Image (cartoon, helix red, strand yellow):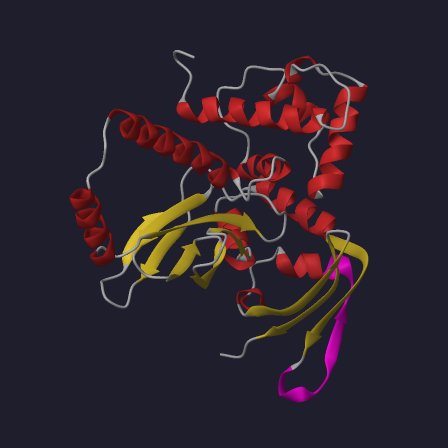
Amino acid sequence: MLGISKEMVMFQRLLEQVTAKFLENHRANPNISLWKGQEIIDFQEDLRQQVQGSISEKWFYTYIKGNPEKLPRIDILNLLSNYVGQASWYAFNEQYTDKKAIMAKGAKLRWGIMTLAVVGVALAIFAVVPKKNTFHFCFIDKDNKEAITDTRIDVIVLDQEESPSYQKSDSLGCFSYTTTEDHIRFIAQSPYYKTDTIYKSVSGNKHHQVHLRTDDYALMLHYYGSNNVKDWRKRRRELEKLIAQDAVIFEILPHQIGVELYEKDEFINKLTTPTKSLQQLQVIETQYRNEQIVMLKFKIEEQ
């Protein structure tokens, strides 16, 4: 595997486990890269049944039958990791780290006998050294459900005992943080996403997804200012796909005077024009059906 990055080695290991999992209940070539036709279709269906997600045939040919030089998107890596029984891609990686540590410890134990004195010292040290917790977070676009990789998210970790720590999300749209605390609180901010404050405590799963909502005003202002018609049209297409044709959209008017109903096209026009009202628009409630918005309630904050 000379010349192959550690990440790609781990991806190949993931595919080996995916193959083994699929072969438990299906007949197929033991080499996943040789799958074709019905084998790929059966695999897509098994993903939908087991983890409520799927991959496209194009993705299969690109990342499994091809020779990719970089990892797939983090949401796909998480999906395949879930398929083989892991909480996330990071958890899948950690299991090998843990196995290596156990193997190394076993080898040392075979070549030497640990004395009671050493055990006593080790236990004493363990008792006084604070336990560390490592949290992993991946940022997801709330609208299109994809990992946010095209822009780095600024992360400000708030610690009661120390000054704030400043970090950025990585190329997969994620970040990790290790602390002796049993919780973490941080602010996530980006020029084109709404700022949000996140609080998580230690639980069985320290791998979390953070869904951020697009700041349409900042995004539209950027598109208008840079005359970026291509991305402006792309955003409109995303909204067209996200909002159901028969969606009920209404604005809560100020001073409790009532509500105003919006047609889908009318609301999309409002979201893609950088007006003052868009800057003050606050979504109160949304309801989804089949991954589309079927009800949306919003108001315009008074300033």
Q: Which residues are magenta?
A: 254-266
Image location (x, y in percent) of residue 33: 64, 15
Please tell me which residue is depicted at 53% across the width and 47% down the height of the picture.
223
> Is residue 255 depicted above or below 269 in this figure?
below
Toward which corner of the image does residue 48 lie, by quadrant? top right
**Front in this rendered view, residue 20 or 257:** 20
Q: Is residue 10 magenta?
A: no
Q: Residue furthest right?
A: 246
Q: Height in image: 294 above or below 22?
A: below
- Above or below — where is 206 with respect to 15? below
In this picture, residue 155 sits left or right of residue 264:
left
Q: Position of residue 191 (x, y in %)?
A: 43, 53
Q: Residue at x 56, y 40 (%)?
A: 86
Task: In this rendered view, identify the residue nearer to me: 58 or 79.
Answer: 79
Can you tell which quarter of the image residue 27 is in? top right
Please say whether residue 261 is one of the residues in the magenta stretch: yes
**How many numbered dots are placed on residues in this image?**
0
Percent position of residue 74, x then y: 53, 38
Between 157 and 108, the one lying in front of the other is: 108
Whether residue 128 sits left or right of residue 269 in the image: it is left
Classify the position of the N terminus by image quarter: top left
Query: Between 272 and 295, which is closer to the camera in this rendering?
Result: 295
Q: Is residue 150 above or below residue 35?
A: below
Q: Is residue 106 left or right of residue 191?
A: left
Looking at the image, residue 25 sits to the left or right of residue 233; the answer is right
Residue shown at the point (27%, 60%) measured from the top left: 164
Residue 212 percent location from the top left of the image: 53, 55
Q: In the image, what residue occupies the spot 35% across and 50% down?
A: 177
